[in-house]
Amino acid sequence: MNIQKTILTSLCICVLPLRMAIGQNWAGSGTLGDPWQVSNAVTLAQCDDEVTFYDDHFILVNNIDCSTDPGYALWQRPDNARRDGIPTAGSAVGFGGTFDGQGYAISNRVESFLDSQRPPYNGTPAIFRNIVFTNTMVTPHPIQQGSGVCAVSPFEFGGSNPSFFNIQVYGVVSNNSSGFTGGMIANGSAGTVSNCISYATVYGLGSVGGLAGSASGTTIKNSHAYGDVSATSTDAGGLVGLLSGGGVIYQCSAHGDVHKSAGEYEGGLVGRILNGGTVRECFATGDVLRKTGVGIQAGGLVGGTQGSSGAILIEDCYSTGDNPSTQIYSPGRNGGFVAEFGREAGSSSHLINRCYSTGDVGASDAGGFMGRSSSGGGSGVVISNSFQAGSMVANSSGGFAISSGFSVTIANCYWTNSDSSDAVATKVGNASHFYDKANSPVDTWDSDSIWYFSSAANPCLRWQDDCNAPPKGSMLLFE
């Protein structure tokens, strides 16, 4: 039986025959206890055939190759119609059911899996879990380019607020026509991302991240990005390009290099934190690279913090990538850990506490740990109990931070690099000073549950699989 003919015919009759017709092609009934069983590219493409299925439940029952997929994103209704031409009735909505991949792989997709800018059907945000995307080659669809709707990354969800658990993405995600590009999520709003990994290489304009291009009010925990990130405009990060609206990143890491050819804010983990956000127990290992002559505000972990609404906290984090000393950028404002800190902070607090960086820095107007804080920072902009252990800061104004022209309080902070001056932090002889938890500033760090000291290297985070901390500390639950 031809499924499209059945759907179109059923639309003229009632909903019940439609559900029966799809039931003849799929096993299951769409309930949580008896979900629709998706077994091939055809049934996968039919998951969003009608709004009546937008709060149903689906599972994969085997691996699916989408080489013959027609190339449209699922659950996408910007104009009360699906992009393949099947009309719908009523207001445009987003998916509000569940999709469980049961650990199976969806391969060779060339479009987003979820593309929804609409509130979820029946008001319940969707849940996606246990899916592996392999050989993903996602680029914007021509129709979306014309309408200005960005469907880059396997998930682009705007206002529909789904949550994601145990998702893995392998492949390439690229976007040269609009903002928001991520290895897994293009533009996230609220919801939770947990235990997800992106191995994708990501190319985009602005708001580009190895895992998420933009995350507003989103909680991201125990998730990681391994692919390189390349951007041509503002906000690029190894994990998240732009974190805003009180978003949280907890126990996450980024490992790819981040390259930017223009625009502001680039970081090994996060490009920019705007108007509130928290980053705790995270690290980045990739280099932060800029095209010569255009490099501004590049930091080993975070490119910059900005905004006067909402507090910003970066705590118990580190970065090891270089902000290369072999390339001199002008203007600079680059830093080994954070580039521009507390811009337009006003009455909102911006705090970095118990953090370190080990990368070399090459820039004008830069510092070993912090590049620059804008004059609007005020008393609420603080860096405390932190250190910088790189070997070189070229053309800098300070071994730890720029020593004049900023408004930030720096307390109990240290540095070891080759720079000869810094009026706001204390220089020590070499990095081995920080291997011993009896020394400042690491004597103030929690070495029981957060940090591990090996006595032969800089401290690592106990949750890391390769931290070799016997035993690992009890993990703090952060919701």
Image (cartoon, rainbow, N blue to C red):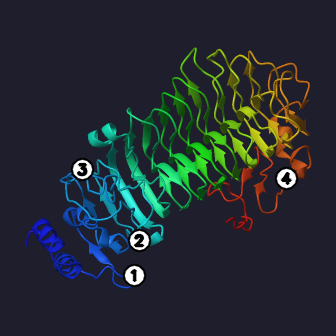
Q: Which residue is mark 2?
A: 98
Real-space CA distance between mark 2 and mark 1, rounded to the nearest whole angstrom: 8 Å
Say if residue 76 shows up in the picture: yes
In the image, residue 54 above or below residue 459? below
Q: Residues within 10 Å of mark 4 (few under 14, many from 20)?
A: many
Q: CA distance from mark 4 to mark 3?
A: 51 Å
Sequence-first disc among 2 and 1: 1
Q: Residue at x 34, y 44 (%)?
A: 138
Q: CA distance from mark 2 to mark 3?
A: 22 Å
Classify 10 Å Cα crowding around label 2: few (below 14), some (14-19), many (20 and above): many
The answer to which of marks 4 and 2 sits earlier in the sequence is 2
3D distance between C-alphas at marks 1 and 3: 28 Å
The residue that mark 3 highlights is 71
- Residue at numbered disc 1: 32
Label 4 or label 1, whichever lies nearer to me, is 1
Question: Of the residues tagged 4 and 3, which is closer to the observer?
Answer: 3
Q: In the rendered structure, which amino acid carries the disc numbered 3?
A: Gly
Q: Secondary structure at mark 1?
A: loop
Q: Secondary structure at mark 2?
A: strand
Q: Quadrant of the C terminus?
A: bottom right
- Measure how far apart labels 4 and 1 are at the Cα level: 46 Å
Q: Earlier in the sequence, mark 2 or mark 3?
A: 3
Q: Where in the figure is residue 420, as x and y percent of width and height?
A: 86, 18
Q: Amino acid at mark 4?
A: Trp
Are circles 2 and 1 on residues that touch, CB within 8 Å? Answer: yes
Nearer the N terminus, badge 1 or badge 3?
Answer: 1
Q: Is residue 172 left or right of residue 300?
A: left
Image coordinates of residue 443 in percent, x first then y, are: 90, 50
404 to the left or right of 66: right
